Amino acid sequence: MSSSELDQLRQEAELLKKQIKDARKAAADATFLQVTHDVESLGRLMPRNRKTLRGHLAKIYAMHWAKDSRYLVSASQDGKLIVWDGYTTNKVHAIPLRSSWVMTCSYAPSGNFVACGGLDNICSIYSLKTREGNVRVSRELPGHTGYLSCCRFLDDTSILTSSGDMNCCLWDVETGQATTTFQGHTGDVMSISLAPDQRTFVSGACDSASKLWDIRSGNCAQTFTGHESDINAVSFFPSGHAIATGSDDATCRLFDIRADQELVTYAHDAIVCGITSVAFSKSGRLLFAGYDDFNCVLWDTLRGERVGVLTGHDNRVSCLGVTDDGMAICTGSWDSFLKIWN
């Protein structure tokens, strides 16, 4: 391809980008905060630390609640995957891992399996409900050429993974094969979040962009830009019509899928560190964000205000999750503890 052809294509791409920009501007007839100006303020929220889960011996990197809102799984670089009973704080399973460099974990919706992965580039799936009563590796999914940053089950037979190789994959657990590869990011993919209807998922990456993917077609449907640094965390809004992102640029942002653009930035002059994790409350009115400065901040999604802080960890908050029933939030930290709040 000649250089003149390339220049022509570049110009065409710029023109199309400008058209998209103009279309977005036309759709934005008011700012989000203008529209929500009259919404009643939440005031100060002070969730209490109800439980502390002690047992890991090193930094916790990931946690994920089970669908029943009672059990949760956590992954630590002590080389253990622990399944906890959130009501009693008892350990139900302590699973020794083949690689201690674990970065993500996930609970299957059925409660039958947990999965994890990390610097070994492999997604390992463990069966919790074996006849013998012991936990064993039921499947290993090799295929990524970079570290595994996040994994999420669709059901017992399919799981989504994201990786430092800039790709996401959908796997058939039975065969151990990747059935779809989602390519398009130009940096390590750090986080994925499944839509409530499980037809799409969103990914956040070190190219400062988040992308919406169609699971069935394997295509990227939308790309959301605006962050000035790596995106570490993404989460779907409960309705499925918006996503939240958390980045090393010290901001969280809300993007609307139907308006195809950013609605609001959650930032504060006093917050200068990066965000590791984000999650919505069940109603979507609150956005929880975990920060490198050991705190978890509660944002009022509608008004863009900071309405509370969860303090108690002695190191970076690396992961957090809200239960399916919306009754509790769990934070995990590099201080080796998990805390449950409500």
Image (cartoon, rainbow, N blue to C red):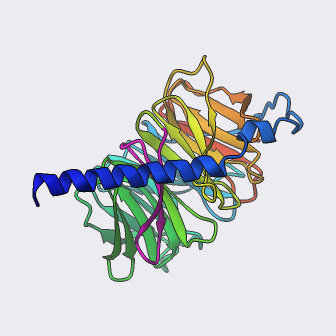
Front position in the image: 183 or 313: 183
Res 309 → quadrant: top right
Residue found 30% across the figure and 50% down from its top: 11
- Among the 4 quarters of the image, the one containing residue 124: bottom left
Quarter of the picture holding the N terminus: bottom left
Magenta extent: 203-226
Q: Position of residue 328 (x, y in %)?
A: 73, 48
Residue 140 horizontal side relative to residue 252, left or right: left
Front in this rendered view, residue 48 or 216 = 216
Which residue corresponds to the image point at 60% horizontal and 17% vertical from the top-left?
Answer: 270
Identify which residue, 141 or 244, lies in the foreground.
Answer: 244
Queried whether the magenta region covers residue 121, the answer comes back as: no
Residue 286 visible in the snapshot = yes
Seen at 30% across and 61% down, the residue is 122
User: What residue is at 71 percent from the left and 39 percent from the top?
Assistant: 31
Is 247 situated above or below 312? below
Compared to 148, does 152 lie above or below? Answer: below
Q: Where is residue 314 in the image (x, y as percent from the top left)?
A: 55, 24
In the rendered view of the protein, which quadrant contains the C terminus?
top right
Residue 261 visible: no
Farthest-out residue, top: 270
Is residue 58 rendered to the left or right of residue 175? right
Looking at the image, which residue sits at the far left?
A: 2
Near-viewer residue (197 or 173): 197
Q: Is residue 212 magenta?
A: yes
The location of residue 23, given as percent across then percent down, is 56, 53
Residue 269: quadrant of the picture: top right
User: In the figure, is residue 180 to the left or right of 69?
Assistant: left
Residue 93 percent across, percent down from the top left: 52, 58
Total number of numbered discs in the rendering = 0
